[in-house]
Amino acid sequence: MQHPELITLDKGVTRFTLSTIGEALNSENYSIPYRYVAEMIEVFHVSYESKIWEELCHNGLFDIWDPIAPYLRFRESKRNPEKFSIGLFRVYEIEEEFSEAEIEKGDRHHMLKRRDLAVTCRRPLLKDAEFEKIHALLKSVAVKYLI
């Protein structure tokens, strides 16, 4: 995989308000080593309305969030609602592990990049069948809100 984005857990970024399920995960105590990458699979350009988050935060996909949180965060960012989208990424564990000194920050604080980096994928975190189930579930909601 060329030019992957290394996944981290940046606790300094303003995060969404968590649901009871999300709070129970105790994410403040998580540490993610720099040995996971994300690959963009599909982008859904959807209308900016709270109904989509009501569905996504109660159907098993984003149950860790209070449904109003992602909706309000986008509104407060003052971005053009016509540019709103939801991205589906596939996460892979890689053979290599990198130190913070070996990577540089990209525009997204929760993912870090390193230029001209090739990595060896060990395995996807979700098996194909489970990933396809999640993809289908996201798509079944997103198609109702496509712009």
Image (tube, grey):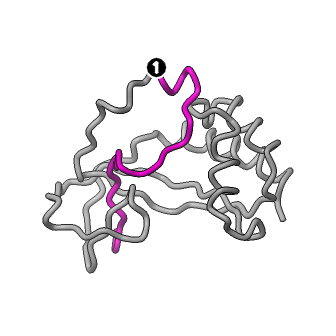
Q: Nearer the viewer, residue 82 or 44?
A: 82
Task: Give coordinates of residue 89: x percent, y percent.
Answer: 51, 55
* Secondary element at tag 1: helix
Under mark 1, the amino acid is: Ala
In which quarter of the view is residue 6 placed?
bottom left
Residue 13 in the magenta stretch? The answer is yes
Identify the image quadrant of the N terminus. bottom left
Residue at horizontal 20 percent and vertical 54 percent from the top: 95
In which quarter of the view is residue 125 placed?
top left
Judging by the rendered image, the residue that carries numbered circle 1 is 24
Q: Nearer the viewer, residue 147 or 41?
A: 147
- The region drawn magenta spans 1-23
Q: Residue lying at the far bottom in this picture: please name it.
A: 116
Q: Nearer the viewer, residue 62 or 96?
A: 62
Task: Give coordinates of residue 97: x percent, y percent.
Answer: 17, 54
Left or right, 92 with respect to 146, comes to left
Q: Nearer the viewer, residue 88 or 86?
A: 86
Residue 18 in the magenta stretch? The answer is yes
**How would you classify the magenta stretch by its main secondary structure?**
loop
Residue at horizontal 38 percent and vertical 25 percent from the top: 26
6 versus 123 height, above or below: below
Task: Give coordinates of residue 31: x percent, y percent.
Answer: 26, 38
Residue at horizontal 43 percent and vertical 64 percent from the top: 108
